[in-house]
Amino acid sequence: MNPAALAFAAFLTAAVGTLGGLGGAILLVPILVLSGMEAKFAAPLGLVSVAAGSLAAAPQQLRARVVNHRLGVATEIVASSAALVGALVSGFIGQSLLAVLLGGVALVAAFFGGRRKGIRNLPDPSLTAADVGETPGTLAGVYPLGNEFVPYRAKRLPLGLIGMGMAGLISGLSGVGGGWVKTPTASEVMHVPVKVAAATSTFTVGVTAAVGLLVYESQGRIVVSDAALVAAAGLVGGTVGVRLQHLLPPPLVRRGLSFTLAVIGVLLIVRR
Amino acid sequence: MNDLGVLSKILMVALVVTFACALGGAFLPGTASVWSGTACVVILIAVPVLRVTWLVVDWTKSRDVKFALLGCALLVVLATSGAIVFLR
């Protein structure tokens, strides 16, 4: 792939990945492989894109207090542990079976996200801008929606942790990151508002990507010039994605997320 | 109350530095390109770990013990994962 096309692909996937909290690698890696790049070199570039998108989104998401770090840290322990198990057993599972499993998970997540109507968490008129952020000691908080403020609390934690464990396992097995499972799990299973779920997922996929990049660096699989180009484009794409996330209404973000997941699911199953 | 404003400013500096290093890695000639690109990747790896460490310190200061311990547990998981992968 020529440098201009690589930069454009990295920009686009980082923007979409950050907007929906998907991570971007699930989109970028198939594009790179389809363009003729070897998977063993495409996977590290996917994680560079994820890490860049996560970093680009962080300052604005922190200023907006839309990330729930407590939820992210609590769920990432399970996800990272499962990712390690997945990476260790990845050699025992056929890639074709894995692609069908991944595609099936993406389609199920797309279905549940797409069929829901309206907004689950409603604004509370008694809340003010001073209430925005996380509630210490809990997995709850308040996030801004236009000129209103919406309280939320993560529900069904055990089921959510199972989902996050699955996301980690899939990430470890496939090497494409698990943001595309984490965001729907937080939103649809734990009833966290989609914008908070996406922002929190963007934080946690950065953590997962850091570990993955360390591994790839130790294996000498990172082509520095390509990685730098993807990082530069990913930083710009992530900045654009997080601005769009701030501007767009939650139902539109959720529908966009469902559509993207459906495309990913079909691509994974067709390409296996 | 978490002082996320300070963390946001630190991450903004990291973002600008990483972008400069990434541009250097992509467009500078010779070894300058390699050093710049490597610095970019190193920052991308370091930032999330530093962010979790910052949160652990912040939660410890604000006596949110439960989540400070969870943050420590996450750092242990990450360190263990890195060690296992390197040893293999």
Image: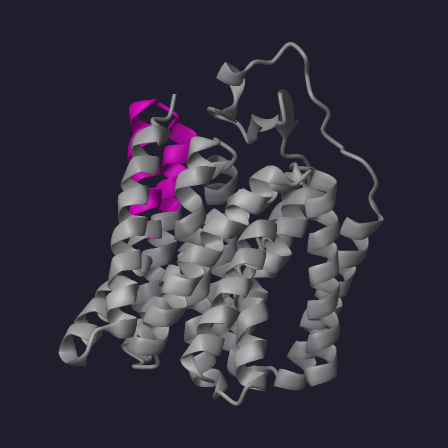
When the figure is inspected, residue A270 is found, relative to residue A24, above or below; the finding is below
- Residue pictured at 38% horizontal, 28% vertical: B65
Q: Position of residue A70 (x, y in %)?
A: 47, 36
Quadrant assignment, res A228: bottom left
Instruction: Give the main secondary structure, helix, strand or loop, of the magenta stretch.
Output: helix
Between residue A241 and residue A79, name the one nearer to us.
A241
The answer, for residue A235, to whether it is visible in the render is yes
- Residue pictured at 56% horizontal, 13% vertical: A128
Quadrant assignment, res A40: bottom left
Between residue B44 and residue A69, name the one nearer to us.
B44
**Horizontal placement of B68 versus A126: left or right?**
left
Q: Position of residue A218 (x, y in %)?
A: 28, 76
The answer, for residue A94, to whether it is visible in the render is no
- Residue pictured at 33% horizontal, 44% vertical: B51
Q: Position of residue A167 (x, y in %)?
A: 59, 59
**Horizontal placement of A200 versus A229: left or right?**
right
- Residue pictured at 53% horizontal, 51% vertical: A241
- Residue B64 part of the magenta-drawn span: yes
**Horizontal placement of B67 versus A105: left or right?**
left
Between residue B83 and residue A40, name the one nearer to us.
A40
Taking the view exactly as shown, the residue that stands out farthest to the top is: A126
Between residue A134 and residue A247, name the one nearer to us.
A247
Q: Position of residue A251 (x, y in %)?
A: 74, 41
Quadrant assignment for the C terminus of chain A: bottom right
What colouring method underlies this structural image?
Answer: one colour
- Residue A7 part of the magenta-drawn span: no
Magenta region, residue range? B49-73
